[in-house]
Image (tube, grey):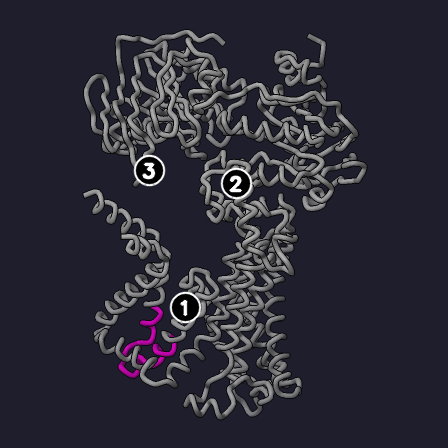
Amino acid sequence: MKTKKGILDSNLFYTILAIVIGFAIGAIFLLIAGISPAVAYGKLIDSVFSKPKYMVWTLVYAAPVIFTGLSVAFSFRTGVFNIGAEGQYIVGSVAACVIGILVPLPPVIHPLVCILAAAGAGCLWSLIVGVLKTKRGIHEVLSFIMFNWIAYYLQNYIVNIPIIHKKGGGEATENIKDTARIIFPDGIMKALDCTGAHWGFIFAVIAAIIIFIIIEKTTLGYELKAVGFNKNAAEFAGINVNRSMLTALGISGALAGLGGAVQTLGMAGRLPQLAAQEGYGFEGITVALIAGSNPLGCIFSGIFYGAMKYGGSKLTMVKAPSEVVNIIMGCVIIFIAISQVFKAIFTSIGKKRKEA
Amino acid sequence: MSHQSHMDKNTMVIEMRDIVKKFGDFTANDHINLTLHKGEVHAILGENGAGKSTLMNVLCGLYHPTSGQIFVDGKEVHMNGPRDAIDLGIGMVHQHFMLIQPFTVTDNIILGIEPTKAGVVVDEKLARQKVLELSERYGMKVDPDARIEDISVGMQQRVEILKVLYRGSKVLILDEPTASLTPQEIDELMQIIDNLTKDGKSVILITHKLKEIKACSDTCTVIRQGKYIKTVNVADVDENEMAAMMVGRDVNFKVEKKAMTPGDVVLDIKDLHAKDYRGIEILRGLDLNVRKGEIVGLCGVDGNGQTELVEVLTGLKKAESGSITMLGQDVFNKTPHEVFEAGVSSIPADRQKHGLVLDFSVEDNLIVQHYDEAPFSKHGILDRSVIRSNATDLMEKFDVRPRGAEGKPAGTLSGGNQQKVIIAREVTNDKDLLIAFNPTRGLDVGAIEFVHKYIVDQRNKGRAVLLVSFELDEIMSLSDRIEVIFDGEITGSVAGADADEKELGFMMAGGKKNEN
């Protein structure tokens, strides 16, 4: 009885339930589209788990969304809503890319500088919004959305600056110098049988652990959470509310910027001219919600999202639209959001049984 | 205030017999009996969490009793929701009003059972007329065309009562009706209750203010920890007896204070000017000091600058001009942190807004000013075991219940226990000055006694205490010196021992001392 109650109370149970329901609804849409869900989901699972290298690819896909997920989760925990992770991701990748192309530095140092620059750029991008909020009272959600678009056009402007634009045409920058890449050494790459493997996922896990410690164990986390939960009481207790809010936004922005850095230095190696927002920041919201804003949870929900993205990209091979992945993820979010309703229903059913 | 009874002992309106209501393993109501007659005012007295609201929710059809019977006009009834209760003539006025702010008074009263023309269009004229009739009949002044957001709390309450009457209720349940009213509005409410019972309505009054029970009730049923204690004739008992029945032990209303000679000036305020949120000058040259070993009670009607004064003193608000010193140190327009460091701790008026982070655990709330100091943290890392044992000690010492709730969110505690958490934190700070703003608002007598004891303790230790309260009784029983604030200035000063309620009341209304 006790264990059953424990399960009904646990958030993990409802998260898994939401995922199952998400897949079920996805199946309905597949049926409508005339595709066998068994075939499509079979392909999805197959393309993630059938070979070790596919699993490595999943982690490669997971790395940037773990970072943006952490960014959003951190903001949720500290009472601000960073819907601007998209823009911070972009300025992070721009900073990493520009330094990766233009500044000649020795290996190890070079990516480190790029990564720091990306974190700084993301942090700054978020801080501007924070200052607008604390000094001028402009709601952060509003400015964040606008700053996403400013970052988007900024990237397209910078990509086309002749000094870094790809020579001889093409809609992208040059490739960054090899010294700036964070891909695994050839030996490991061969062992994994994966040509795209890089350090991004490892960095993301380290970042998640650091953020977890900051939130749960440090005075900084205490302060930021106090402000997030009750600004008035925090101020009354002598905590500097504006400074805390800026700190929270700065850290959140830096995390999203780091996501841009690992993707650029690890995966792409250059910046394309964007035709639309890539959505890493918004995917971060999904990752954070699935993780229940728990930094360590973001690792797992990030891997889940990475698997869905990587597996989804192969759905076309069975003539299923890869958009079905978006439908599934959307449903998962809706059902996580209303999981409290399920909780209430299950507990009341349980109670009635007990009474009867 | 003398109470004239309109109770008809021969006509029973409601009888609740052996009501039991369980939530899981917890028994909120344990065999409770209640009998209500026509024209009776029946008070239900109990501490916070005693089960008063549960019992009333059973009577209102919101809860199903686990066992027991309810009779209305002698017939047993089974209610399946509030709708059934309304049809039976039982209406409840909740403590927190349920009104639609942008709607007019009339709209709110008729909502749900609007009189219509041809069954489609709301008959505004008829509705307005009905509302006016009702309000005149019971002497309840309301403006039928005013919007709720524009009217006073007292008038909003009258709208709630009219809403219930409009639905044809003959039994009115008033839940903590005086909680947010001014003394004058309370008098008006007493008059309304009298008018209602004169007309044959019955009133159930949920409260823990003994004075009000004495002033307007016929009978009083006492509930303690979910159990029925007894029903008494209010005329036969005094306030002390009622308090003892409610708490289960003798309650000491008279605060024990040893005689003390005040020492040096701790807080010194000179010619303080400040504006309120609308930019209107609310403090107009206020002078006030508090000395060591002294409780200074600041009394006045709400809105004469008390809130702003406390905000300025605690660093939440910037003043325009003047000077404030703490033991000679300038604390004028400093931040809350600087003020705290200068020796000011404070019990805020709004415990949920300023006092506690409700989503934080109790133990985290207890260190909110000290989280970044040893022993609670070292090098920026919190020491959870020290934080826990600190909480366990304080909860024991200050009787915060339930024990073992160190890690539970503060929001899960009852109001009285939330206040105890704040008191534990602020008193343990042991600063030179303690500012207490309405420290017992919404608390039951047991908790009030507790809070008062700790405030007096601080004084006895030689600390300075500034008590700001809208409860005249509290000011009079605690203060060594009473200062009256009116229109942003101190208009009078009396020694606590010499205080006279009438004289203070006169001064609070703007009269100068010795003019009457």
The front one of B425 and B96 is B425
How far is the residue under mark 2 from the one under mark 3? 23 Å
User: Which amino acid type is shown beneath numbered disc 3?
Assistant: Phe
Q: Return the residue at label 2.
A: B395
Say left or right for B339 vs B28. Answer: right
Q: The magenta stretch spans which residues?
A: A309-327
**Is-magenta flag for residue B288?**
no
Q: Return the residue at label 1.
A: A301
Say left or right for B320 vs B215. Answer: right
Say left or right for B63 vs B237. Answer: left
Q: Give the residue drawn at x 27%, y 65%.
A: A25
**Which dot, 3 or 1, sits closer to the camera?**
3
**Which dot, 1 or 2, sits closer to the camera?**
2
**Is-magenta flag for residue A312?**
yes
User: Which amino acid type is shown beneath numbered disc 1?
Assistant: Ser
The front one of B249 and B176 is B249
The front one of A315 and B496 is B496
Q: Position of residue A326 (x, y in %)?
A: 35, 69
- Residue B137, quarter of the rendered image: top left
Q: Give the residue drawn at x 36%, y 9%.
A: B198
**Which dot, 2 or 3, sits closer to the camera?**
2
Q: Position of residue B81 (x, y in %)?
A: 26, 33
User: Which amino acid type is shown beneath numbered disc 2?
Assistant: Met
- Residue B485, quarter of the rendered image: top right
How far is the residue under mark 1 from the one under mark 2? 39 Å
